[in-house]
Amino acid sequence: MHVAPPLPLLKRVPPGVWTTLTWCAGLAFTFLMRVRLPGESEPAVVAGVLVYRWDGLAFLAVATALVLAGSALQRRRPMPAMALLLAASTIACVPLGVGEIPLAQFLAVDVALYFIAATRSRRTGIVAVAMALAVLAGYLTTRLLSGWVVGTSAELAVALTAAIAWLVGNSAHQAHEYAEKLRDQAAAQAVTDERLRIARELHDMVAHSIGIIALQAGAARRVIGTQPARARDALGEIETVGRETLSGLRRMLGALRQPEPGRPPQAAPLDPGLGPGLGLADVDRLAATTTDAGVRVDVRWRGERRPLPAEIDTAAYRIIQEALTNVVRHAGTHSCRVSIDYQDKELSIEVLDSGRGRSRTGGSQYGLVGMRERVGLLHGEFSAGPRPEGGFRVSARLPVPAGVR
């Protein structure tokens, strides 16, 4: 079974963990700057009066609590989380006796800015960086109005780090959007190229055969009353050409089911059989094959099972087959559920798993595009995406003609 490569560290660790670690590192740096380290004649920064008193430590504890609360909200509610982090950076300055918000107390805000700009909309990122710069400016303004000393130059450097964090995150967001557009274009181009190739092959194969059949049928019609033997020969030729054409079509469609040159072997369908006529009656055998591949399939039938038009029966089987292939390749789970519901006017198919959900969309989307195209040709409805409770869901609804019951 295919094993997906591990995600980079930056993606495996939640954003809130990064902001918390950054705050703790900045807090440790703040205390190190206020003690005499080896090789120094005196501390780099003179400690404020409140730093080591209980009230000063209480301010730092409150700021740390705000950071922890903001980190917990970072993924779900980024803007309230940013407000808490900015409040923490301001409160932490009270016992330090400084004229500006130091960079060590603002690094957690910079990290949060990066994640907001990289994962949220451009408007949200702009609002977040505006909030950060407004807090820095407001802190200096408050000290100026109070007649206290301010560190304007140092504060400008801190503001520069906020702008850089937003720029880097915005660049990452744009790169992700560009990659998504490239994948969409590649999928659309793949569908177009495949249709054109199939159309060319069908034209070359069918047009020649139909031409021969038309000629032989015309000859048989002209001589069937006067030369029955020649008419029989012509009809026999029509039968031969028709069988050869049908066999060629089957070979071509069978070749399309095979993995392309250079494609990993595990990317092939679970059931690469070339024989025609595969349908819902073969789902149980497909489920057994998938179970042998390492993923247990629970097939649930609903409604009264009845014969379906060949195109609907085959399309339903292929959708289930491709969905199970994606589960084996990408979901990272040991079980899934297939539901097939026979209704009066439609056939409903649903494939559910409890695997990695959204992470599987990082790979090729051609399988989903193919399923969507197949359902669209039958005027049905198709949906696929992560489930809120985790895992992935593939659903298709295929209309059944009124005369089929």
Image (tube, helix red, strand yellow):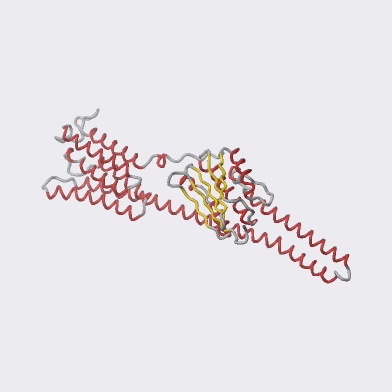
Toward the viewer: 156 or 193?
193
Q: Going by the image, does 156 lie left or right of 4?
A: left
State which quadrant residue 380 falls in: bottom right
**Measured from the top left, where is residue 119 in percent x and y?**
38, 49
**Measured from the top left, where is residue 213 in percent x and y?**
77, 65
Toward the viewer: 58 or 148?
58
Toward the viewer: 385 or 170?
385
Total marks placed = 0
Say which residue appears at 16% left-offset and 46% top-offset.
150
Query: The N terminus lies in which quarter of the figure?
Result: top right
**Measured from the top left, where is residue 333 in percent x and y?**
51, 39
363, above or below 199, in the image: above
**Measured from the top left, where is residue 112 in percent x and y?**
32, 45
Say which residue appears at 79% left-offset and 58% top-offset.
240
The furthest residue to the left: 147
The furthest residue to the top: 38
Say which residue appears at 70% left-offset and 61% top-offset.
204
Q: Going by the image, does 96 lie left or right of 189?
A: left
Query: The C terminus lies in which quarter of the figure?
Result: bottom right
179, above or below 295, in the image: below
